[in-house]
Amino acid sequence: MSEQLLINISLIVLLLPLFSFFITVVFGKRFPKLYLFETGIISLAFLLSLVIGFFKLTTYVDSKLAFDFTWFDFGVVPVIGEFKVELGVMIDNITVIMLFVVNLISMLVHYFSIEYMHGDKRYTRYFAYLGLFTFSMLGIVLSNNLLGIYIFWELVGLSSYLLIGFWFEKNSASDAGKKAFLTNRVGDIGMFLGILILFTTYGTFNFDKIFSGIASGVMPFESTAWLTAAGILVFLGAVGKSAQFPLHVWLPDAMEGPTPVSALIHAATMVAAGVYLVVRIFALLTADAMLVIAVIGAFTSLLAATIALTQNDIKKVLAYSTVSQLGYMVMALGVGAYAFAFFHLVTHAFFKACLFLGSGSVIHAMHHEQDIREMGGLKKKMPITYATFLISTLAISGIPLTSGFLSKDGLLAGTLAFGELTGHWLIPIIGFTVAFMTAFYMFRLVILTFHGSPRNQHKFDHAHESPKLMAVPLIILSALSIFIWYTPNPIAPDAGWFLGKWIETPSTVVPEAASFDFMINEDPAADVIHSEKYEHAMHTVHYPAMGLSIGLAGMAILLAFSMYQWKKINPDKIAESVKPLYNFSLNKWYIDELYHASFISGTLMLGKILFWFDANIVDGIVNGSAWFTRVMAKISGWFDTFVVDGLVNFTAFMSGFIGLTFKRIQTGKVQTYLVFVLFSIVLLLIVFRPF
Amino acid sequence: MNGIPFLSLITFLPVLGMIIILALPSSKVKEIKYTTLLITGIQLILSVFLLANFNFTSTGIFEQSTFQFVEKFRWIEITGLSWLGTVKVDYFMGVDGLSMPMIILTALISFIATLSSWNINKSIKGYFALFLLLDTGMMGTFVALDFFLFYVFWEIMLLPMYFLIGIWGGPRKEYAAIKFFIYTLFGSVFMLLVMIGLYFSAQEVLSDGSKVFTFNLLALMDQANYTADGILSPFNPNNLRMVAYIALFVGFAIKIPMFPFHTWLPDAHVEAPTPISVILAGVLLKLGTYGILRISFPIFPEITTQLAWYIGLFGMINIIYGALVALAQKDFKKLIAYSSISHMGYVMLGMASLSTVGINGAIFQMFNHGTITAMLFLIVGVIYDRAHTRGINDFGGLASQMPVYTGFVTVAFFAAIGLPGMSGFISEALVFVGAFGVDTTRILAMISTLGILLGAAYMLWTLQRIFFGKLNEKWSSLTDLDGREYLMLIPLAVIVIFLGIYPSAMLDVMNSSVNELVRFVSNGFQNISIGGL
Amino acid sequence: MIEVGLNHYLAVSSILFALGIYGVITRKNAVMVLMGVELILNAANINFVAFSRYSNFGINGQVYALFVIILAAAEAAIALAIVLNIYKTYANVNVDEINKLKE
């Protein structure tokens, strides 16, 4: 199979869901059965992505297939010269793995949704949106440039918005959708600015061209500080999409969407896009940028884990655990554990999708009850759901023989190595703390939901195991949470094909001065990740990290069992004894309230003030000048009437007055006139004295 | 091909229609409406025909020979005036990449506004006659290449607009109409002054070698044509070009409308009937920015480069200020009006960058704002026709009552937000790429990105308040879109999406002209004294 | 015996003129007013003739006097006709009451 053919197939895979979206959205009303068509298209896309994956990972395993086309061309531009904007697709090993993950989970979610969403009044529309999402997500995965990623980035934002607010009759749902979109926009602005910095400097959006530009020593605005800024700004996009602190607030709210959507978008794929983005730009991150990323990731994972400890909504717990795990991946990228971060992305996608679909199965069975305090004992009623849920929980807790163990262990080893190499020990400490908490709250969730005795007998009695169409996706996903798919050796993640052959850590292109020591390979010929130093550090911490994480997870599970299963320790009492902390966690650190009081109210208030300003000051000046003109007009009108016209009238009046005065003399009697004549003559004679 | 005066045809066709309508008895409502539709339809077809025959590589801007469909002949000639010499005014029309998108936009929006005028029911004859006159004014302004002719068309627009708002408007129509009229006239006065100043500062060389004062825009762009002592001549050490530039800019800025000259817009929009709002937002606002690009930039290149930052600054203020004020609106139509102010800010920001990308983005944004905002106002019109209210908080849950309508609203709103895949994204992104790429406007561009967020905030909030939530029982009788409304909205939606996916369709039209403009402005006038204030 | 000279004539004419004026001004009857006018005219005539006799104008004065007499006759005829007409219209000839000129 030729390279061109593979690329063409990938384009078909990309466009198939878009096509089905259009068909379904336009004709969905007339032909409600189109959801089957949609599901079929996605399944076809999955099969095609399998084909691509197979050929890429066998024939072209070490090469990168790329295809660029010009989107628009400005020709020769003054000052800059040739200027055009290109888009393109690229297929490397990461791409095909992502294609597989996205298409598989999307397909399974489609199957799951056929049952789960049954009877919804906008059933077909729901599938159309899923198609739109799949298209956008595949676009992110396939793009070989920042612009393409940004475009699809926004489109996944749209489909996420539509799907979170799918039940828009509920105010909470439409609120959550809006919140998700806007919070993401905040991050996107940063990402956009980062892209602008890179584009302005290197004249291209293409990753490889940007990297070679940086490698050739050209810095944005002649300063590595700007390169750091560009890295952090682009990362801000990931902060938004992958729900990192301080933009994590949207993800828990996004659980207002239908549960399969949460599984697909808000657990497995879209939220991982942020991590994927950082994976793509990994080579241009400077030491400072990496440190920022590591700190944000670590803090996020801690924050979310502490919140997850106390939540009672089954989906909220999972949501915070997602945030926490995403924080893990981001942290891993920050500490340079590139391969493990991506590995964790993949394994997390499967087990978290499984957990969410499992929770969907539970919610479906419990007639849309989401509060775990109302559940309990469902193990007997829903054995398949329970088994798959348990496997995934073991995976997320990092218990050996699961995929989660492999990725999480490597990731934690990475943080330890980082601590050793740079002295930032806080990051591994947080990493292991979070590992402990994760195992604890996940088992708390499992025990409260499935074990023990039912706390709401009525709902329990009506619960039932989900139908096959819902169970099969669970089984497939939980099967993918077993180590065997990734490596033959359950304790050595890099012994297998996934990390050993497919994922290759890119070497940094950042100038040495701005990079961590361990990122620089002293001997380019040596086949190492980053450098000998780093290899060595990873090697020495591998087993300690493994032991530590297994130990912590085991303790956490024990603790969970003793608190919730065996009731040896009363959780309420602990909660009571650390009441402020408990409330702090339960109320999500009051971050929502803080944002609401500061940014949101502030902006709205500013809007109101400016509107007042607009209506009263700006328009006041306009109306004032109109008023002034009118007053001036009145004054000049008065002047005109009384002064100018007054003079005219005065002349006329005076004439009239004089006339009236002399009218008296005119008696009409000839004799009187004669007297006047005589008198006048005498007068004249006297005056002129002619004699 | 040659010899047929296409531009005169496309410009004066509506006048012909107006005469026909005036000749019809006012009882023939149907005939009047269909005449208007036919005329605007032919105009649309003509504009597409012009596009089809448009040479994309011909630059325009400066050289008459590179303009297309040129018509030029002596219009006014008065000889023997003692001190004025000979007054000669040309009837000079032509098209280049700057005006082509605007011609298409004008024809398109006029056609759609005609459809939207269908349910006007007050003195129909007068309405459509004025409507067509307005159409001529707009089209003429975009094709005129002589300042005098430009000014005539500019003023022609004013009168019908005044009556269209003042007679067919809402409750405060008189106030709004007078405000609009006086505001615009205020700007025109400045323009007139600058026009006369330019006239007495430059002399065009005729074919027989004699020199006459000129209104010809292209002649005014040529430094060699200026006299040594003209008041606006760059050779005059005491010239007033800076003052003239600012005066002219204010004249255009009122039309954009630029902060702080914007307050006529919300009033005019709120009071105007739907089709007039569509025309106002869709076409009229573009005249301001078009005028700056066509007249201010190439005639005053040296001052343009000097003041570019201020243009960008006002663009930024427009973007953020408009968006913040929009956030506080409770009237749907007023919200869209303020969003227009915000969106026109992008145009100014793009222009201020004086780079090919930025100006391409600006013109593209002009076109896109035309289509998107037209859609938004049509959308407001649809709901206002049915519910007779525009209060955002009066609604709620309409999505379940009017799903198709909601679909179009979503498309329009997301286009306005600048979602990729829709045309608004491309233009906004180009504006930012252009403005960020230039040192002068980089900081402005960075701050302006806040507008993207605020834009999304007010749009989504509005979407939520009107369409989501539980349906208010009061509105359970509202019907979804009818055929005529489909006919108005579908073409716009298709254009918005098409240009979002294939922007080259529009960018290629303008690109060579924009390149020429940028080259021209950056070369500027040489060896001249820059007049201070 | 005092020789009769120019001054005597002038004195007579002055007395006549004064009487005439007095008549014109004081009389109410239009006919009496006319008679006053005649007196004034005759006073003028006396002056004409007197100046003609005592200076070297030749007979110019006498000629003018003749003209005046003719004119006075004509004037009397027309004036009496007017008075008659006035009488016909207003049934009196009292000049005090006939003040139509005022209007």
Image (cartoon, rainbow, N blue to C red):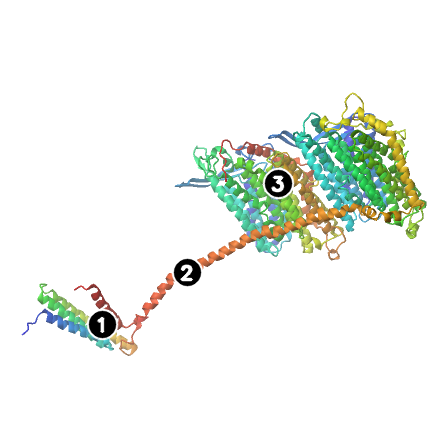
For badge 2, the amino acid type reads: Gly
Where in the figure is residue B8, as x and y percent of width and height?
Answer: 54, 41
- Chain assignment, label 1: C
In three-dimensional space, the C-alpha distance between marks 1 and 2, rounded to whole angstroms, equals 51 Å
Q: Is residue A173 left or right of residue A395?
A: left
Q: Secondary structure at mark 3?
A: helix
Mark nearest the camera among 1 and 3 is 3
Q: Report the residue marked by disc 1.
A: C78
For badge 3, the amino acid type reads: Val
Q: Report the residue marked by disc 2.
A: A646
Q: Residues within 10 Å of mark 2 (few under 14, many from 20)?
A: some
In three-dimensional space, the C-alpha distance between marks 3 and 2, rounded to whole angstroms, equals 55 Å
Where in the figure is residue A459, as x and y percent of width and height?
Answer: 90, 51
Q: Residues within 10 Å of mark 1 (few under 14, many from 20)?
A: few
Q: Secondary structure at mark 2?
A: helix
Q: Is residue A29 visible?
A: no
Mark nearest the camera among 1 and 2 is 2
**Residue at far bottom of view:** C91
Q: Secondary structure at mark 1?
A: helix
- Chain assignment, label 2: A
Q: Residues within 10 Å of mark 3 (few under 14, many from 20)?
A: many
Q: Are marks 3 and 2 on the same chain?
A: no
A130 or B66, which lies in front?
A130
Q: Is residue A335 visible?
A: yes
Quadrant (top left/top right/bottom left/bottom right) for the N terminus of chain B: top right
Q: Report the residue marked by disc 3.
A: B347
Q: Are marks 1 and 2 on the same chain?
A: no
Where in the figure is residue B183, as x and y percent of width and height?
Answer: 55, 49
